[in-house]
Image (spheres, rainbow, N blue to C red):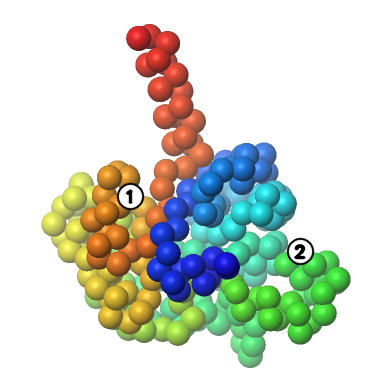
Amino acid sequence: MSLKQRLADRALIVGTFVKTPSAIVVEVLALTALDCLCLDAEHAPFDRAAIDSCAMAARAGGKDLLVRIPVASPEHVLNALDCGATGIVAPHVRSAEQARELVRMAHYGAGGRGYAGSSRAAGYTTRGMADHLERARGTVVIAQIEDPEAVDDIDAIAAVEGIDALFVGRVDLTVAYGATSQDDPRVVAAVERVCAAGRAHGRPVGMFLARTGDIPQWRAQGASLFLLSSDHGFMLAGAAALMAAASA
């Protein structure tokens, strides 16, 4: 079943962020039971070549790959999708109009994604146009909600057709609200408001959580996509566990 369909079905989807621009890291993580990987091209040094090689590794390993693009612009969306990513996560979607424009960028049609039959996504010219266009219907478009303006307009954003999920950027919301803890009541209320909008408009909701123990709380509010930790987090936790075991 496609990632797009699993999102629509509200299946539990667990993935992780990849912060290291290395195809080998992606290749290794593709061996795990994680549902998907997300290249963090917003906050880590992923250039076009790195996204391309990581997408190749993910596809070779049969793992769905999302790319959190640096900014929601046609060139960044096109690059990630032509390289063969399953979909994109767009940061700082603040309004319904921005959400509608994001959907246009990510799909073929008038004013939308530019077509090239020579890309990895199109099978390097080995697929016909009709086949590629049909496959591209499975593109996943996720709007990241991480600004107070977005929370204020969340019902309109959630109503935009073609947005496959809303993804809560809780850390950015914490900073934007002038808080110092993700558990600040203002931040929690904002996340709850996003979840409520998702339920009201039939839009899946995802989020990053620092504590995996919080998953049941947010699952109960309708969240189903969780991008947790990162390759950096795994290395740090593994090293700490190794030292603790060796020192016992």
Q: Quadrant of the N terminus?
A: bottom right
Q: For this view, does 87 lie left or right of residue 60?
A: left
User: Looking at the picture, does residue 140 appear above or below residue 52?
Assistant: below
Q: Amino acid at mark 1?
A: Leu
User: Is disc 1 placed on a helix, strand or loop?
Assistant: loop
The residue singled out by tag 1 in the image is 209
- Measured from the top left, where is residue 127 in percent x and y? 82, 74
Please give the name of the residue rendered at 24% of the width and 73% of the height, measured from the top-left corner: 196
Q: Position of residue 11 (x, y in %)?
A: 42, 64
Rendered image: mark on residue 69: none
What residue is drawn where x is 23% and y is 50%? 182
Count every numbered label the image shows and give the total: 2
| Residue in the foreground of this view, choosing between 186 and 248 | 248
State the residue lying farthest toward the top: 247
Q: Give the amino acid type for the residue marked by disc 2 in the picture.
A: Arg
At numbered mark 2, what does the secondary structure look like: helix, strand or loop?
loop
Q: Are marks 2 and 1 in contact (CB under 8 Å)?
A: no
- Residue ID for mark 2: 120
